[in-house]
Image: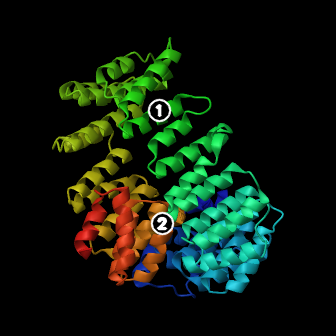
């Protein structure tokens, strides 16, 4: 979502007024003063800047109020009205969202984003019939982007999964979904995310009838069968695709991905081997063979790549080094990496060479190689930064206390580098030193107040490891304004709602995050909330899912200890 940018003259005035308005806004915030007679509410620039200060403070309710005032003072400027509407929706302030939406509608009645926000507000208010009409209008729009807006509304704007599934079913029954395979596939995937097997089946029946013989339909069917716990049927659906993998690389990757999700690594590799090969497919195949511990096949693939690359170019030498590394033929891997002559591949080969030296037990040589890269004035900043981060990663694996020294050296060479500070903050959190983790994340935010990763990480850390829940919510809300559909941020938001005691609201957000990102930490969060709500059988299901994804996940371990599940 683009951030509203005032006209140039307003920006010039803003540069002079920011300190004064910042102090004025801070005074208002401390008093909780939103007096409608205050002159600041009647000044377009003042209200706009105060709104931005409120966003930066993570106070979305106040930000919505200021932006609504700014939109009114601008006589309904569409950009301001849109921002006021979106912020009010994020703040859960449906009353102000409706007022801002009314201004937006008056000045941009045909805007698809406005109509999508209109449908979202109807869903939030429980006006399902009205929302259905609005969604149907989006789906039947002449603009091909209409269905995408409807999809976004249903995927993220509903109050809960039941409401979204109910409306999606009605839209399917009314024939509102446009006759485009991509649209049907998207809504079929949404039905899967909503855990509605029956609805997914209905959508699949429609797709098969409308697009007979389309291999992507069979792929969706296999995915649905797998996620509903019918792996053998999923395998049959994939087998029925036959040589469909030859149609194109995207489909081939999709089929291989389904086999991988089923745990059939050999079938995934066999699928990738169909059709033309390139560096990407060779690396993926080698990775699958390594995970399957099929060193015989991996060695044969290594020989195949060497045979087709009699005079390897830099990319091929890098690939051969990676394959030798997968094979644990570290001496050969090192030889390949050292002969990469130049170009962007050379930088990656030098880093990977240090990793291989570490695997060979030549730690002193690995540290010397990395020190050389860190101090190489001819290398770009990314290379030097990555050399510090790799050294810290390797030292972490060995529980080497020198990990901290690496970060300190990195920051001495690149003061306040956000990536190094961020990684050091994660180290402090791992060591249960939350004050130092917070200090590093705040240093990132001092230099870059809009660093989404740092906002989310700090907000989540405060929610998870302290009792400063209100402060955590403000930080997470700042991240939500920037990336409202980021699954990791949605998970953090759900988690802080749980810590605030809003368990049912938390469950809605956490389920939404898990539907977008199958992550052990999110599954553990859902399990813990369900357990606290007394829904132990359902909680165990999510704990089991989390174990299947990452049994060593720290959030999962803490949740199991806390609940005794």
- Could you tell me which residue is drawn at 49 percent across and 15 percent down? 307
The answer to whether residue 308 shows anywhere in this view is yes
Quadrant in the picture for the C terminus: bottom left
- Looking at this view, name the residue that lies furthest to the left: 401
Measured from the top left, where is residue 68 in percent x and y? Answer: 62, 78
User: Residue 318 falls in which quadrant of the image?
Assistant: top left
* Crowd class of label 2 (few under 14; some 14 to 19; many from 20; radius 10 Å): many
Give the left or right position of residue 426, taking residue 41 as reference.
left
The correct choice, above or below, for 477 with respect to 279 in the image is below
Point out residue 195 in the picture as x, y percentages from the top left corner.
54, 70
Residue occupying the point 67% across, 87% down: 127
Q: Secondary structure at mark 1?
A: helix
Residue at 78 percent across and 71 percent down: it is: 176
Q: Quadrant of residue 85?
A: bottom right
User: Mark 1 — residue?
Assistant: 283
Distance in Å between CA atoms under marks 1 and 2? 30 Å
Residue furthest top as drawn: 311
Percent x, y for residue 65? Answer: 56, 80
Q: Earlier in the sequence, mark 1 or mark 2?
A: 1
Q: How many residues crowd mark 1 within 10 Å: few (<14), some (14–19), many (20+)?
A: some
Q: Residue at x 59, y 33 (%)?
A: 274
Residue 472 appears in view = no
Q: Nearer the viewer, residue 91 or 202?
A: 202
Q: Nearer the viewer, mark 1 or mark 2?
A: 1
Asked if residue 206 lies left or right of residue 2, the reply is right
Q: Which residue is mark 2?
A: 513
Given residues 253 and 96, the one toward you in this image is 253
Q: Is residue 525 left or right of residue 343?
A: left
């Amino acid at each position: 979502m683009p951030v509203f940018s005032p006209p140039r003259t307003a920006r010039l005035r803003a540069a002079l007024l920011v300190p004064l308005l910042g102090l004025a806004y801070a005074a208002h915030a401390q008093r909780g003063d939103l007096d409608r007679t205050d002159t600041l509410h009647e000044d377009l620039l003042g209200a706009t800047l105060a709104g931005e200060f409120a966003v930066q403070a993570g106070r979305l309710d106040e930000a919505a109020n200021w932006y609504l005032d700014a939109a009114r003072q601008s006589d309904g400027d569409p950009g301001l009205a849109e921002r006021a509407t979106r912020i009010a929706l994020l703040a859960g302030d449906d009353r102000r969202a409706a007022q801002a939406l009314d201004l937006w509608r008056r000045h941009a009645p045909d805007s698809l984003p406005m109509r999508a926000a209109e449908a979202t507000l109807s869903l939030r208010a429980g006006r399902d019939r009205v929302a259905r009409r609005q969604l149907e209008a989006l789906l039947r729009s002449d603009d091909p982007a209409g269905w995408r807006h409807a999809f976004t509304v249903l995927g993220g704007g509903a109050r809960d999964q039941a409401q979204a599934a109910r409306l999606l079913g009605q839209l399917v029954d009314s024939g509102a979904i446009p006759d485009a395979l991509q649209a049907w596939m998207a809504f079929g995937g949404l039905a899967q995310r909503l855990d509605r097997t029956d609805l997914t089946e209905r959508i699949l029946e429609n797709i098969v009838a409308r697009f007979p013989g389309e291999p992507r339909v069979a792929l969706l069917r296999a995915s649905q069968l797998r996620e509903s716990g019918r792996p053998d049927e999923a395998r049959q659906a994939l087998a029925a695709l036959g040589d469909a993998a030859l149609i194109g690389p995207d489909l081939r990757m999709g089929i291989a991905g389904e086999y991988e999700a089923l745990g059939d690594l050999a079938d995934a590799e066999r699928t990738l081997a169909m059709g033309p090969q390139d560096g990407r497919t060779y690396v993926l195949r080698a990775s699958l063979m390594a995970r399957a511990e099929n060193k015989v096949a991996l060695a044969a693939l290594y020989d195949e790549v060497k045979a087709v690359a009699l005079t390897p170019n830099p990319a091929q030498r890098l690939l051969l080094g990676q394959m030798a590394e997968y094979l644990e033929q570290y001496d050969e891997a090192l030889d390949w990496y050292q002969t990469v002559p130049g170009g962007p591949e050379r930088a990656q080969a030098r880093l990977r060479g240090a990793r291989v030296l570490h695997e060979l037990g030549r730690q002193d040589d690995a540290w010397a190689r990395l020190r050389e890269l860190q101090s190489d004035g001819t290398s770009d900043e990314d290379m030097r930064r990555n050399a510090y981060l790799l050294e810290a990663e390797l030292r972490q694996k060995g529980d080497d206390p020198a990990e901290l020294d690496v970060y300190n050296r990195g920051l001495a060479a690149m003061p306040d580098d956000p990536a190094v500070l961020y990684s050091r903050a994660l180290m402090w959190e791992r060591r249960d030193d939350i004050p130092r983790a917070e200090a590093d994340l705040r240093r990132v935010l001092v230099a870059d107040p809009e660093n989404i990763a740092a906002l989310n990480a700090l907000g989540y850390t405060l929610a998870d490891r302290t009792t400063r829940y209100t402060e955590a919510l403000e930080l997470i809300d700042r991240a939500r304004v920037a990336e409202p559909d980021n699954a990791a941020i949605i998970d953090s938001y759900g988690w802080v709602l749980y810590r605030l005691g809003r368990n049912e609201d938390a469950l809605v957000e956490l389920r939404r995050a898990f539907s977008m990102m199958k992550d052990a930490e999110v599954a553990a969060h859902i399990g813990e909330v369900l357990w606290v709500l007394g829904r132990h059988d359902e909680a165990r299901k999510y704990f089991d899912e989390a174990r299947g994804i990452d049994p060593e996940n720290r959030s999962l371990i803490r949740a199991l200890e806390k609940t005794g599940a």
